[in-house]
Image (cartoon, helix red, strand yellow):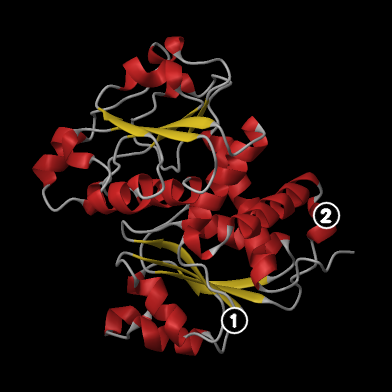
């Protein structure tokens, strides 16, 4: 049995196999519509989610399986003080696989230590979000045709953004990757990411504070929102939330084949006048998330080869 807590829990070969399976599912979903019949996915979400929870549910339903679970800590026995360890020991009797989101870093890892079913980390605090990373990789692979030799701009909240941390870890294993890290000083990538991932792997990167000046170099622009829920100080959030706003005018200097990604939800960091630009790929990205999660669920349950 395998758990997916971090994108580093998968080898590059395993990720490539997952992305290839996801591409096949995207091209021919009917072929995989019944491979999870008789299987159940538990969605244990201790904090709010729209895309991640619904895409997990859509993924399991697309595979012919069923879904059960809860969508907030208040609607679970966590509100009575039940531990994650006890919850997962119970859920293990009800489902075949579990997707867990939790505001505390490490909670899905704790769950995996007590679970008798595969655990998928659906986001733990500011730490990891491996299925969003699979979504990002699938999106880049589908749109750019490759995952190597890319200059990737990460813009916005790089300190608390778990999607950014997971993506840096995953992309550090591909050749020819260069990062441009665009953020205010207060929201820079954490030191441990710079030292243990970027520096340790010899990945070239620069830290800058100007979005428009660096756009012409990018193959991928990955925008993020400044996350109010991660701030202890409301004044700091208000001061920083509008630091970077991408609009049509700023895009004038970007490559014609650059693509704009965003894990969503968007607040105002991407103006609505960008939505009609052919480089805007964030809604397509959300759609690819279903297929990335379909491939992961099928693989962890060992039904990925069971096609009609």
Instruction: Residue lying at the far right in this picture: please name it.
Output: 308
- Please tell me whether residue 27 is drawn above or below residue 74 in the rendered image: above
Q: Position of residue 261 (x, y in %)?
A: 49, 34
* Residue 119 position within the rendered picture, expressed as x and y whole percent measured from the top left: 51, 74
- Identify the residue at horizontal 26%, vertical 46% (top origin): 159
The disc placed on residue 294 is: none
In this picture, is 168 found above or below 124?
A: above
Distance CA(mark 2)–CA(mark 1): 24 Å
Q: Residue at x 46, y 15 (%)?
A: 254
Count of number-bearing discs = 2
Is residue 170 left or right of 33 when viewed as pictured?
left
Quick one: label 2 or label 1, which is nearer the N terminus? 2
Observer able to see residue 181: no
x, y percent for residue 127: 34, 59
- 218 on left or right of 13: left
Question: Image quarter for residue 141?
Answer: top right
The answer to which of 37 and 141 lies nearer the viewer is 141
| Label 2: how many Cα within 10 Å (few below 14, some 14–19, many 20+) | few
**Does residue 253 appear anywhere in the picture?**
yes
Secondary structure of residue under mark 1: loop
Q: Name the residue beneath numbered marker 2.
A: 30
Position of the N terminus, as image quadrant, is bottom right
Name the residue carrying label 1: 95
| Quarter the C terminus occupies | bottom right
Q: Secondary structure at mark 2?
A: helix
Q: Is residue 106 left or right of residue 130?
A: left
């Amino acid at each position: 049995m395998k758990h997916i807590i971090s994108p580093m829990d998968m080898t590059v070969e395993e990720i490539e196999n997952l992305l290839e399976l996801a591409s096949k599912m995207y091209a021919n979903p009917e072929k995989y519509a019944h491979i999870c019949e008789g299987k159940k996915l538990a969605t244990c979400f201790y904090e709010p989610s729209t895309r991640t929870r619904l895409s997990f549910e859509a993924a399991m339903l697309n595979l012919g399986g069923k879904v059960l679970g809860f969508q907030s800590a208040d609607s679970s026995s966590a509100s009575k003080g039940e531990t994650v360890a006890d919850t997962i020991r119970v859920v293990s009797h009800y489902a075949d696989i579990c997707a867990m989101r939790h505001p505390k870093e490490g909670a899905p890892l704790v769950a995996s230590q007590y679970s008798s079913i595969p655990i998928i980390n659906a986001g733990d605090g500011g730490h990891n979000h491996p299925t969003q990373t699979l979504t990002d990789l699938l999106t880049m692979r589908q749109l750019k045709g490759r995952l190597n030799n890319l200059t990737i701009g990460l813009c916005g909240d790089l300190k608390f953004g778990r999607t950014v941390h997971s993506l840096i870890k995953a992309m550090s294993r591909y050749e020819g990757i260069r990062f441009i890290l665009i953020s205010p000083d207060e929201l820079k990538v954490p030191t441990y990411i710079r030292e243990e991932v970027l520096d340790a792997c010899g990945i070239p990167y620069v830290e800058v504070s100007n979005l428009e000046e660096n756009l012409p170099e990018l193959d991928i622009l990955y925008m993020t929102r400044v996350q109010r829920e991660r701030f202890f100080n409301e004044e700091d959030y208000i001061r920083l939330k509008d630091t970077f706003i991408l609009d049509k005018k700023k895009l004038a200097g970007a490559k014609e084949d650059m693509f704009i990604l965003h894990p969503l939800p968007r607040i105002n960091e991407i103006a609505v006048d960008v939505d009609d630009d052919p480089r805007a790929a964030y809604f397509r990205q959300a759609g690819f998330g279903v297929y990335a999660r379909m491939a992961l669920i099928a693989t962890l349950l060992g039904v990925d080869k069971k096609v009609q």
